[in-house]
Image (cartoon, grey):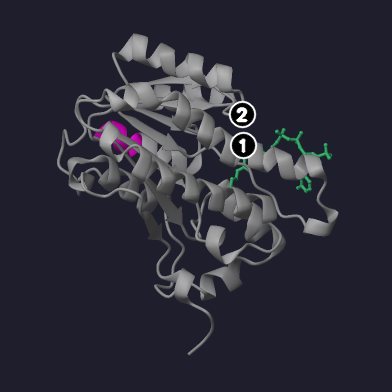
Amino acid sequence: MEDIFGPGLLKGRVALVTGGGTGIGLSTATLLSTLGAHVVLAGRREDVVRDAADNIVAQGNAASSVQLDVRDYEQVAATIAGIVKDQGGLDILVNNAAGNFRCATEELSPNGWRTVVDIDLHGTFNCTRAAFDALSASPYTGRVVSIITSYGWSGWPGCAPAAAAKAGIQSLMRTLAVEWGDRNILCNSVAPGAIGDTEGAKRIHDDVGRGDHELSRVPVGRYGERDDIAAAVAYLVSPAGRYVNGTDLVVDGGRQFSFGTA
Ligand code: COA
C-alpha cells in the first residue's frame, strides 16, 4: 500500500492508534508510519503494543507504544498529554480499539452489554474528547477517524452491544464534524466489511461456522484485507481528505447492499 501513496505523505504528523498492536489497528499504524508519521500504538497488553512498535522501528519507521485501557478517561488524558510532551503534538487519532463477541441478547448479562459499550463507544468518546486541544492545534488540521461497521445501521443479530455502540460512534463523529469543523478538526468514520485474518472475523464468522455464508454475501467475491482499511484511513488523514468531514467511508466490497441472490 505504501507504493500507492506518495512517500512522505504524512511526514511530520504524530498519530495515535488505539488497539494498534494487532489486526486492523496494526495494519493502519504500519501504513501511516511508512508514509512518514510517528505512530503511537496504544493497547491494553503492554507487551503486544511494544513488540508491534519495535517491529515498525526495525523497518526504519517511527513508532512508540503505550499501555492504555480506553475505558479509563484519566489514563487516556495522561497518555495524550505524554504524547504531546514527547512528540510535540498530536495530529491524527484513530479510534480502533474495540471489543465484541456473539451472544444472544436474551442471554447477555448487563455487564456484558456494558463492557462492550464501554470499550467501543465510551472509549471513543474518551480519546476524542481528551485529544481535542492537541488536534485543534495541529498545523495539518487535526483528524479523527473512528472504525465502525455498517452493522451499526443495519443491526447485528448476536452482537447487539457492538452494533449499538458503533451506531453511537457514527453519530458522535457526525456531531463533532459540525461542532469541530471550524475548530481545525475533521471527524470521519470508516466502516469495514468482513475483513479476513482479524480477531473480529474469527469470533463472529469463522468460530460459529458462518465463514462461507459471509463470503457469499460479498459482491466482489473475497474477504477484505486489513490493508484495505488502512488505505481508507490513510486517505482520510492525508491532504487528499482535507474536505471530507462527517462521512462514513464503507469499505466492504459492496456487501451492505447485497440482500440476496439476483
Ligand atoms: N458471551 C457472553 N458474555 C460474555 C462473553 C461472551 N462470549 N465474553 C464476555 N462476556 C461478558 C462476561 O461474562 C462479563 O459479564 P458478567 O460479569 O456478567 O459475567 C462481561 O462480558 C465482561 O467480561 P470480561 O471478560 O471481564 O471483560 P474484559 O474487559 O476482560 O474483556 C471483552 C472484554 C469481553 C470484549 C473481550 O472479548 C475483549 O477484550 N475483546 C477484545 C478483542 C476483540 O473483541 N476484538 C474484536 C473486535 S471486533
Question: What secondary structure is found at the residue carrying circle 1?
Answer: helix
Does residue 43 belong to the magenta stretch? Answer: no
On the image, the x and y values in percent for residue 158 come to: 71, 60
The segment highlighted magenta reads 30-34
Residue at position x 42%, y 13% in the image: 81
Q: Quadrant of ligand 1?
A: top right
Q: Give the camera-side residue of 129 and 119.
A: 129
Residue at position x 49%, y 18% in the image: 77
Q: Give the camera-side residue of 81 and 5.
A: 81
Q: Can you say whether 117 is above or below 21 in the image?
A: below
On the image, the x and y values in percent for residue 136 come to: 30, 27
On the image, the x and y values in percent for residue 67 come to: 54, 20
Which numbered tag is attached to residue 71?
A: 2
Residue that label 1 marks? 119
**Whole-Å distance between the Cαs marked 1 and 2?**
6 Å
Count the numbered circles shown: 2
Question: What secondary structure is found at the residue carrying circle 2?
Answer: loop
Residue at position x 45%, y 55% in the image: 191
In the displayed orientation, state which residue is furthest to the bottom: 262
The answer to whether residue 58 is visible is no
The answer to whether residue 92 is visible is yes
Answer left or right for 191 relative to 246: right
Q: Decide: marks 1, 2 in contact (CB < 8 A)?
A: yes
Q: Amino acid at mark 2?
A: Arg
Does residue 33 belong to the magenta stretch? Answer: yes
Q: Can you say whether 108 is above or below 179 in the image?
A: below
